[in-house]
Amino acid sequence: MDQTTTQSKLQSLPVTVRRRKEKWFRKDFQLYLLLLLPIIYFILFKYVPMYGAAIAFQDYSIFQGVTGSKWIGFDNFRELFAMSQFYTVVRNTLVLNFLDLLFSFPAPIILALLLHELRVMWYKKLAQTILYLPHFISWIIIGGLVYQMFATKGGLVNNMLSLVGIPAIPFLTEKMNWVLVYLGTGIWQSAGWGTIIYLAALTGINKELYEAADVDGAGRLKKMWHITVPGIRPTIVVMLIMQLGHIMTIGFERPFVMSNPLVMDYAEVISTFVYKAGLQSAQFSLATAMGLFQALVGLIFVVLANTIAKRFGEQGLW
């Protein structure tokens, strides 16, 4: 009798689970519909275009398409690695991204900590709004502002320097000065927007920890160092891993808009190389090979960074 009852319960278990799932779906179907939109986006614009990676192994012709073009194996990669320009653009991409990681990555963390300490709410909201604004400005407009500000002749900064007898500084034509302007502009444009994630993480810190610290006589700096920073450390680690995954990926607009022929030795990066090779020179296979190489290196960085984070006891991405 007991065995028969057990078998009956086991047979009815899938039906119970299915009914429970149907109940969940009927209850929260609006959320599932909202989730459907990003799923469709990723399928159409992230996964479907992956078939185009086959171009990297073909002598691609736009008239024959992916299915009709001749397969040539790794010849495009051999040609790519034999180019002297390849090593220049990889070096520039790594250097600029590493400097961005060194200076731009801590900026939103510091801003979030400072905003978190503000007690006057209207001033805090005003500061957040002002800091967010640069994120919504196009890099084309930012590039124009940079030239208006830092041009050697007619730039606002050099005009002000000339008024006090200081000679003009070649901010945009001397390589090291250009790198400093590039980094500073990136921090100004992205730091405010990056604080959103860290401010959200700060709201999850237990307020009782601050109350206990007040009882112990801890000041603001000690509470920030011993409570606030450890509270957002998992978020910092995850964001760092994701940033390392983009160490070989660099946006197109920023270096393209801010570059000029005098600093191309530092400003030519992978994204501008792919644009010139793929669109201007119609070397689609070569540009795709570069993009595939870039993605593979980024994947390696993500896996290594996640492994190191797990070794140090952090949560990681998976």
Image (tube, grey):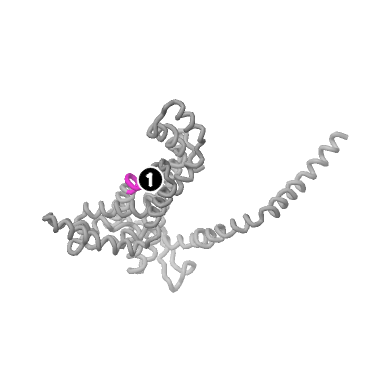
Q: For the residue labelled by badge 1, is the local secondary structure a helix, a strand or a loop?
A: helix
Q: How many marks?
A: 1
Q: Which residue is mark 1?
A: 111
Q: Residue 33 falls in which quadrant of the image?
A: bottom right
| Span highlighted in magenta in the image | 100-107
Q: Residue 12 falls in which quadrant of the image?
A: top right
Image-based side of 61 in relation to 88, left or right: right
Q: Residue 6 falls in which quadrant of the image?
A: top right
Name the residue: 21% across, 56% down: 171
> What predominant SS class does the magenta segment belong to?
helix
Name the residue: 72% across, 51% down: 23
Residue 232 rendering spot, x and y as whole percentages: 45, 39
Can residue 245 be seen here? The reply is no
In the image, is residue 83 above or below residue 67? above
Can residue 161 be seen here? The reply is yes
Residue 306 rendering spot, x and y as whole percentages: 45, 41
Residue 101 forms part of the magenta stretch: yes
Name the amino acid type tagged 1.
Answer: Leu
Q: Nearer the viewer, residue 266 or 85?
A: 266
In the image, is residue 79 above or below residue 305? below
Quadrant where the N terminus is found in the figure = top right
Name the residue: 42% across, 63% down: 58
Image-based side of 161 in relation to 218, left or right: left
**Identity of the residue furthest to the right in this view:** 1
Residue 217 rendering spot, x and y as whole percentages: 42, 27
